[in-house]
Image: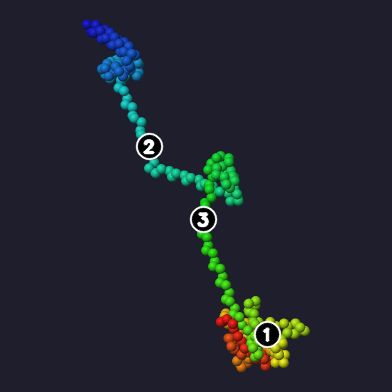
Amino acid sequence: MNAKRIISSLARLISASVSFEVDAAIFGVDALRKEGWAMPVKCPQCGTENLDGALFCDECGASLAQPSVAEPSAAPAEASTAAPAEAPAPTPAASTAVGVVKCPSCHHENPADARFCENCGAALPTAPPTPEVAPQPEAAPPAPPAAVPIAALALEGGLELPLDFSSKGEVLIGRADPVSRVFPDVDLTPHGGYDAGVSRRHCRLTFQGGQFFVEDLGSTNGTKVNGQVIPPNQPRPIKDGDILELGLLRLTFKVRQGA
């Protein structure tokens, strides 16, 4: 009786195994599991197929429990502190050669007015614009020199000898002497200068800062202003109407325009 049960169980097992293998080939193992099929468990030692749920192999007694596969550990966490990024390489400055711009990529030297590298086509650095210089205000034209008043020396007879200060600002008064090569601006020889004791270079009249001056040049008989002898080589201010005495020659200083 027991032998019949064993044979019957083996027949059912073989039938179920064959049916499972056919359905697994057609539908797939996962689909059969979802439909509730009992799947045989193959012994890892002898290869005998055992009923689903069996803990030990019917043939060799080996354990049929599936070892748990440990999940791979998570990848180590990235370092909290990221490695510092490398600083970008400084862009090469333009070549200091006059009229040349160096390419920052391939270092090819290009003409100064080039915008792109002739070798690699990279954009070239442009020179900073030259700051505009504000135009300087034009200097005011110099003020015209003050007009020199017209002056003269009047003799006692009423004759006036004009004095020209426009060319050099001074007038030499004395007596002409071709031998000594002395030629004063106002020659008093024709007006009794020799007999009156006028020296060849007797005195000098100047106009400075709107003021007239008389200066004795070391004459023999001296120079007086309104009766007062003036020291040699010391300019003395004079004005319209002053009396000048050169030796014995008496002259009146006159100004045609107000000084």
Residue with the mark numbered 1: 173
Q: Disc 2 residue type?
A: Pro
Q: Which comes sooner in the sequence, label 1 or label 3?
A: 3
* Identity of the residue furthest to the left in this view: 1
Give the quarter of the image for residue 220. Answer: bottom right
Label 2 or label 1, whichever lies nearer to me, is: 1
Label 3 or label 2, whichever lies nearer to me, is: 3
In the displayed structure, would residue 44 be above or below residue 108? above
Q: Which comes sooner in the sequence, label 2 or label 1?
A: 2
Image quadrant where one finds the C terminus: bottom right
Q: Nearer the viewer, residue 22 or 16?
A: 22
Alpha carbon separation for disc pair 2 and 1: 117 Å
Alpha carbon separation for disc pair 1 and 3: 62 Å
Residue with the mark numbered 3: 131
Residue with the mark numbered 2: 76
State the residue at coordinates (67%, 91%).
Answer: 249
In the displayed structure, would residue 253 be above or below residue 2? below
Left or right of 176 on screen, residue 143: left
- What secondary structure is found at the residue carrying circle 2? loop
Left or right of 50 on screen, residue 246: right
